[in-house]
Image (spheres, rainbow, N blue to C red):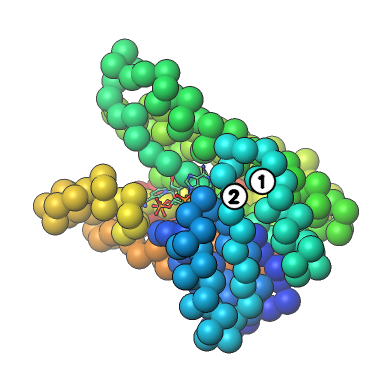
Amino acid sequence: HFNRLQEKVILVIGASSGIGEAGARLFAKEGATVVLAARRLDKLGAITKDITSSGGKAAAVTCDILKEEDVQNAVTFTISTFGRIDSAFNNAGIAGGRGPIHTLSMTDYDRIFDVNLRGIFMCMKYEISAMLESGGGTIVNVSSGAGLSASPGNSIYSASKFGLGALTRTAGLDYAKKGIRVNAIAPGPTWTEAFEQMCPTEEAKERMAGMFPMNYVADAEDMARAAVFLLSEESRWTTGITLPCEGGKS
Ligand code: NDP
């Protein structure tokens, strides 16, 4: 590790498992101070303890991104605990609601859009407000390969992630002169709890991997590495993009 995030205070939204957890752990190894936010405080507590007991700096805060006061609190908690917020990794997201449109329920639509789009919009709103006050920052949202190209039966999730790409691009442009860079990563199949539910058998996992040129399911840390690049000075001339991280598919 090269301390590429040294001195940075980073809020990780959706840090209790999968890509968010891998992000929090890797950012800490790269020298960052991390605030882990999600609903499951027991998970966050265990990860935070792990990070701090190996010499990293971390704290946990409960946050349900459906609730505006929770999102606001996660940002103020970060600033009151560590003095500022330099960066945010907006990773929280849910999948589901698969099938052709006429079979889908509005409950699924609302459930997925409320987290993947409304929730992340709200995170950006409060993070950016704080970054404007402190003079800059970096944000990385977590989209999906499904946010770059649509595939059968995945309308709701895909539309929510396409929307996230638009939020990322717009914010990249709106704050380019303000020292705030906003980018996203678009993971392909990545081995996490959510992925395991989607592909419960070895056969399903292999079938999924086969759809991607590099032909394997990535580790959550592979995605965290791409996020390190976009959060750090390594990408200082890059804003408003969604970086495909899907084994050569896009
Ligand atoms: P996980 O289910 O392992 O993690 C999802 C994270 O989001 C958890 O920390 C969860 O925390 C958090 N989260 C969910 N809902 C909320 C909420 N309402 N408020 C706050 N936090 C919430 O999934 P992954 O790691 O696989 O997914 C992470 C991101 O990557 C998602 O945005 C997903 O769409 C995207 N992605 C994943 C791919 C994959 O193959 N794994 C492929 C493409 C994209 P908690 O439940 O504790 O609140």
Residue at point 56% right, 44% down?
64
Q: Residue furthest top?
A: 102
Residue at point 46% right, 30% down?
111
- Ranked by sequence position, the earlier of labels 2 and 1 is 2
Residue 80 placement, left or right of 212? right
In this view of the protein, which residue sits in the foreground, 70 or 13? 70
Residue at point 31% right, 13% down?
102
Name the secondary structure under disc 1. helix
Q: Position of residue 166 (x, y in %)?
A: 60, 35
Mark 2 crowdedness (10 Å alpha carbons): few <14, some 14-19, many ≥20 = many
Mark 1 crowdedness (10 Å alpha carbons): few <14, some 14-19, many ≥20 = many
Q: Callout 1, which amino acid? A: Val
Quarter of the image where one finds residue 59: bottom right
Circle on res. 166: none
**Label 2 to label 1: alpha-carbon separation:** 6 Å
Name the secondary structure under disc 2. loop
Residue 6 placement, left or right of 98? right
Circle on res. 63: 2
Q: Callout 2, which amino acid? A: Cys
Question: Mark 2 touching mark 1, by CB under 8 A?
Answer: yes
Quarter of the image where one finds residue 117: top right
Q: Is there any visible trace of residue 55 in the rendered image?
A: yes
Q: Is there any visible trace of residue 173 in the rendered image?
A: no
The residue labelled by disc 1 is: 71
